[in-house]
Image (spheres, coloured by chain):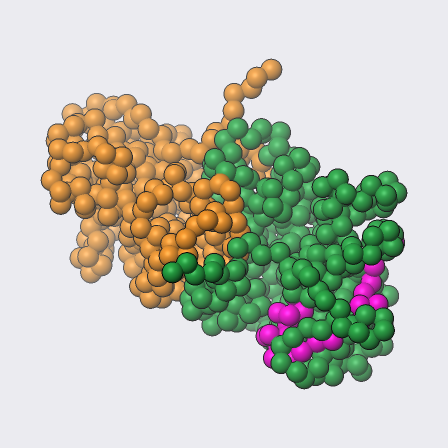
Chain colours: A green, B orange
């Protein structure tokens, strides 16, 4: 019998969830929490990127290094953690030039300085396949202060940081699309694709305010679905409220179907979180103090796990992309 | 100018050592130590294995999983640490059968039970290249009790656990060599190649006795060289003292050149450590209590970092293999 192949999440549920330690929070949060020095917990997270899937062979090596670190730091930000350091595994073709590695190391150095972290160790292996880079990042958070995905309550508002869809549209630019945009808009989107901005300060300040949080890597709708599943709630998103950069807005004006990038394109690395309506003024203050936009995009409802997106007229929209899946 | 390519260790020294955090011990120990709960430190370690380099495409997937965990646990053992858990990154071809993954997960489950550890998280990515598997392992050790590579002193004896060369000879069997050996000997060697035995109990008991310790993965001479470099000492090894299994001894009787497997074949995953001569009786007791052989193979001397191997007549031997290097 030729069974349908399991997708990435089904594979995790079937093969890996049964192996999870209690500290792994049933693998629902994509991080583990272990006991740290008095009053603190360590947040552990691993994420890998593969050439040809997560970055292009001709992407500048320093920016590849920065993206590798930042996708992991973004997960720490989403728990409200302060980054400490990271382990690095590089799997490189033998013929890879040392110049590439030198530039890669320069990117790591730049972001180590920027985010106050250090390299804790690593492994280098040779491969006949594409470059594969894996980081295990470690952060710390006050005991019990980590914001999990499971705390969203009906009546909470849903917020995102920054703007949505830029990363996915930047990828389209690199694929040769969006020629109708200005040079500046295209450069902005490519930069957003290549260099995520982990919202560490905002994330740390949201501990104690947000009821549930994660970062958006698979796309808004897919990732909000993860919060709904973990919290056993539903979500209603007002599409018209989604924050768009000027460049993304220009792209969508020219080609309205590109709005899908904001809903489900992925590669946003913005914070997605829920908070009670009473937090509105605290959040406005936080946005001002951190210089990162915080936008309310919808509400948590009581229905079973499910994300509904409504258009400006209140009509349900169909959402095509449900996030990138590796299998 | 076509410069000679840097080897693996030169690459680490040039590109990664400058990035190391203080907790990474200058990358000399292949592990980092970070503050844990009161009185404890966490030991962090990452190691990756690649299909076609560290294991064969037709190796049983459960044993591949066990090897992946065990090469990391072996590093924790060499610091005297108790394993806690691990993060896992799998990079698999899309067409890889779920049956493989199921068997892989079964191997993880078996070793989790055997070693008392749990899965703390992970990432699964697809690749067009060979299977690449990476683990970041976490252990704990009493503060200041971790045995580093840097503590060897002139006059210390040099010891190894178990037997040497089995893993490298097992690899030769899988490559179709050593047909002259009995079926049982060949099966023993293959098992030693596929299933390292991390010497966790012995390693934990050696904290407080051993002055320097590491596990042998690149081969005795290369790894002893790492201890000499970190400790700024030299080493003299008596080749006739190297502990050999019956199977390895049989292989070397038939083909004396195979002795190189014991000196530098790698894939041993035995403990290599130094201790003052006064520890001899404590070590004999430890060997008896843990059921793991402990064999004195030489002495630490004061000369600059350098490993000399002497044959049974006291003549210097040439050592060809200096350990597997990826670049």
Q: Which corner quadrant holds the N terminus of chain A?
A: bottom left
Quarter of image, res A237: bottom right
Residue B281 seen in render: no
Residue A46 pos. (x, y %): 55, 56
- Residues in magenta, as a range: A223-246
Viewer-proximal residue, A315 or A156? A315
Residue A226 among magenta residues = yes
Q: Note whether B39 is above or below B313 in the view shown.
A: below
User: Tag count in the figure?
Assistant: 0
Residue B223 among magenta residues = no
Viewer-proximal residue, A149 or B69? A149
Residue at x-position 74% and y-position 56%: A261
Residue B173 pos. (x, y %): 23, 37
Q: Note whether B256 is above or below B120 in the view shown.
A: above
Residue at x-position 19% and y-position 57%: B291
The residue at the far front in this view is: A1
Residue at x-position 13% and y-position 45%: B184
Going by the image, does A193 lie left or right of A8?
right
Residue A191 pos. (x, y %): 77, 45
Residue at x-position 69% and y-position 42%: A63
Viewer-proximal residue, A47 or A36? A47
Quarter of image, res A295: bottom right
Going by the image, does A37 lie left or right of A309?
left
Q: Note whether B90 is above or below A180 in the view shown.
A: below
């Amino acid at each position: 019998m030729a069974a349908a192949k399991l997708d990435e999440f089904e594979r995790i549920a079937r093969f890996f969830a049964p192996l999870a330690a209690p500290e792994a929070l049933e693998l629902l949060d994509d991080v583990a929490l272990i006991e740290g020095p008095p009053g603190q917990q360590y947040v552990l997270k691993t994420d890998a990127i593969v050439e040809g899937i997560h970055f292009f062979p001709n992407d500048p090596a320093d920016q590849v290094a920065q993206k590798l670190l930042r996708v992991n730091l973004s997960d720490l930000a989403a728990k409200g953690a302060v980054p400490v350091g990271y382990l690095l595994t590089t799997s490189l073709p033998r013929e890879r030039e040392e110049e590439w590695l030198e530039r890669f190391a320069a990117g790591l150095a730049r972001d180590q300085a920027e985010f106050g972290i250090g390299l804790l160790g690593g492994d280098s292996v040779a491969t006949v396949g594409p470059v594969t880079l894996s980081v295990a990042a470690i952060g710390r958070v006050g005991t019990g202060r980590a914001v999990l995905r499971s705390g969203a309550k009906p009546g909470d508002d849903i917020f995102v940081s920054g703007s949505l869809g830029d990363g996915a549209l930047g990828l389209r630019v690199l694929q040769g699309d969006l020629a109708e945009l200005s040079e500046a808009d295209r450069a902005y989107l490519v930069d957003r694709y290549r260099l995520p901005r982990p919202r560490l300060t905002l994330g740390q300040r949201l501990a104690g305010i947000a009821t549930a949080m994660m970062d958006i890597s698979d796309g808004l709708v897919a990732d909000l679905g993860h919060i709904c599943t973990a919290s056993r709630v539903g979500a209603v998103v007002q599409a018209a409220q989604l924050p768009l950069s000027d460049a993304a807005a220009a792209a969508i004006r020219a080609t309205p179907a590109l709005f899908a990038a904001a809903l489900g394109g992925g590669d946003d690395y913005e914070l997605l979180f829920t908070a009670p309506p009473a937090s509105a003024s605290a959040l406005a203050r936080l946005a001002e103090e951190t210089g990162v936009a915080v936008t309310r995009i919808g509400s948590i409802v009581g229905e079973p796990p499910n994300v509904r997106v409504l258009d400006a007229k209140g009509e349900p929209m169909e959402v095509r992309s449900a996030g990138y899946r590796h299998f």
